[in-house]
Image (cartoon, rainbow, N blue to C red):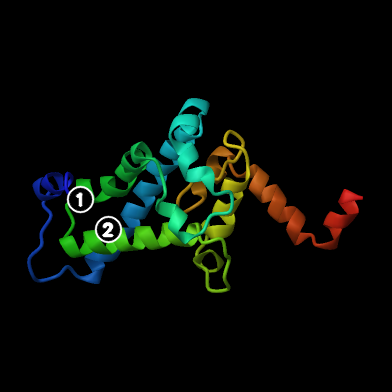
Amino acid sequence: MIFSYPVFTYMGMQSSLPLPSWKVILPQILFYFIVEDFIFYWGHRVLHTKFLYKHVHSVHHEYATPFGLTSEYAHPVEILFLGFATIFGPAITGPHLFTLWLWMILRVLETVEAHCGYHFPWSLSNFIPLYGGADFHDYHHRLLYTKSGNYASTFIYMDRLFGTDTGYRKLKELKSSGGEVEKKLE
């Protein structure tokens, strides 16, 4: 964030009053989520190649059953690499400082929720279509590095589009069939 400050100010970031209206803030935040998701998906997928996984991303995967704090536990190279996805949207739009802070807070809350290990009745994945959440990301942490899929950070549209969530969808289908699973296993 410190090193990106000159870029933000060059792109027009403001920190003075008045604060921007919600009509300005909400579209910007939505844009940031979409841009971040796209860049994060490809960056995360690259981190699952054998070399980068072994030397960089395996640090984050030390926890097969993640909990909230592990969302930020990563190799410094990974933090810079995937952190680019988080700051790219704000860097090209020059938001108000309040919008930037709000975006950073929402992004951290989302990643902590995705790594919390619980799918609560109030989880956003129950209310927002294509929102991944903890269940989606837990599957990613349970499997071997090259076969995990589920690379998205927030929304699962990239995994759907490129078929990297097929194992997860099959597992959900088996779980939803209830008693049918036991019959198929026998």
Q: Residue 28 carries which label?
A: 2
185 vs 36, left or right, is right
The image shows residue 34, relative to residue 147, as above or below, that is: below
135 vs 115, left or right, is right
Q: Which mark is residue 180?
A: none
Q: Marks 1 and 2, how far apart in space?
A: 8 Å
Q: Which residue lies furthest to the right in this view?
A: 186
Query: Residue at position x 73%, y 54% from top?
Result: 173
CB of mark 1 within 8 Å of CB of mark 2? yes
Disc 1 is placed on an element classified as helix
The image shows residue 155, relative to residue 52, as above or below, that is: below
Query: Residue at position x 57%, y 65% from top?
Result: 118
Circle 1 packing at 10 Å, graded few (<14), some (14-19), many (20+), is some
Residue named by callout 1: 93
Q: Earlier in the sequence, mark 1 or mark 2?
A: 2
Query: Residue at position x 23%, y 51% from top?
Result: 90
Q: Residue furthest bottom?
A: 122
> In this orientation, which residue lies closer to the viewer: 64 or 99?
64
Say which amino acid is labelled 1. Answer: Thr
